[in-house]
Image (tube, grey):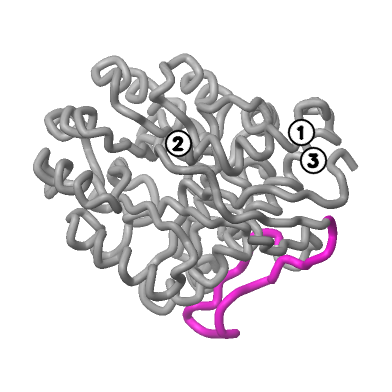
Amino acid sequence: MVLPSSLELPATADCHVHLRQGKLLKNVIKTVRDGGCSTVFVMPNLSPPIDTVEQAEAYHAELISLEPRIEYLMSLYMSKNITPETVRAAKKSGKIHGIKVYPQGVTTGSEEGVVSLDPYYPVLEAMQQVGLVLNLHGEVPSGPNINMTTAEAYFLPTLLKLHKDFPSLKIVLEHCTTRLAVENVRSCGPNVAGTITAHHLSLTRDDVFGDPWHFCKPVAKSPQDREALCKAAVSGDPKFFFGSDSAPHPLSAKHVVPGKKAAAGVFTAPACSQLVLSALEEAAERGEIKSSALTQQNIVKFLSTNGRAFYGLKPAEGRISLTRDEALIPKTIGERDSDVEVAVFKGGNKTWGLEWLT
């Protein structure tokens, strides 16, 4: 074992999470603190998408009413309803911290997404002026020469062009999955960062093929890509921080039947901090990262301080204690055999026990 048997850490900031809505939200939100998180950046791809300040504020109020111990960073969905005036109102609200770009058709809830960012340049200029973050789902739609395994690579020129055209705009390339994505984020200035998920630190494409429970967008890539992600996570580099992309779907949406595809998403919220520790320790045991890099200081930077610093937040006030092999990841959450029962990533496996200290 590379890590000690117990760790005390500041609470995690999950800078990319899907909490959903309705009955599913009420079950999912209960699990956020189970994963050691006190701050979450909430995705806006609901039905309908959250693309007005009023919708975001109402969603924020609902989240607070369900779990008031969490700090919720809200976001808007880039759509034709977003204008420079929307950007200024979002910033003024104090609750909205970013605008999320979903290329149309690439993932769950992207049906009303962006076809081209060119018409949104006045919006991006306003975001640059007021300091609102641009959050990018970094894939392009599949086409004759593009598929799920190459969609991220084909998006990266867009990232570089946006950074060139708006050098002071804060940009996050969400859920990086490739060595090339890591390299491109590093090649940009300090205003460009990347989030990395727990499941992409663990999975490769071989784990995904034939297993709908491991299927997500973007899909996991090669062992070499996973290695690059693990190295970035323990580098201490402020340009990389944790975003779980925890994406719950009812069991029925993940079951594959003839004529129906599995929904894209891996649900990690109930043990997201614990899963990161295990994935990084496994990477060290495989020899993909140096044991000397897997320090408590680098873990804290990745899970807690880098993300908060990028979003201009204060350091975490809460602290968590983790003890090896003192808990089991639940197999599912929600009422059994209901339309809101959700499978949990690596459910049934031993994991770090987590206790809130403050």
Q: Amino acid at mark 3?
A: Glu
Upstream in the sequence, badge 2 or badge 3?
A: 2
Viewer-proximal residue among 191 and 178: 191
Q: Quadrant of the image for the N terminus?
A: top right
Residue under label 2? 147
What label sits on residue 281 in the rendered view?
3
Upstream in the sequence, badge 2 or badge 1?
A: 2
Q: Amino acid at mark 1?
A: Thr
Name the quadrant containing residue 188. Answer: top left
Viewer-proximal residue among 75 and 144: 75
The residue lying at 25 percent from left, 21 percent from top is: 166
Real-space CA distance between mark 3 and mark 1, rounded to the nearest whole angstrom = 10 Å
Spot occupied by residue 223 in the image (x, y as percentages of width and height): 70, 32
Assess whether mark 1 and mark 2 are in contact (beta carbons under 8 angstroms).
Answer: no
Spot occupied by residue 124 in the image (x, y as percentages of width and height): 20, 31
Q: Is 26 on the left-hand or right-hand side of 352?
A: left
From the image, give the main secondary structure of the stretch colored magenta. Answer: loop
Magenta run includes residue 334? yes
Spot occupied by residue 76 in the image (x, y as percentages of width and height): 26, 50
Real-space CA distance between mark 2 and mark 1, rounded to the nearest whole angstrom = 37 Å
**Dot 2, how many residues are within 10 Å of its Cα: few (below 14), some (14-19), or many (20+)?**
some
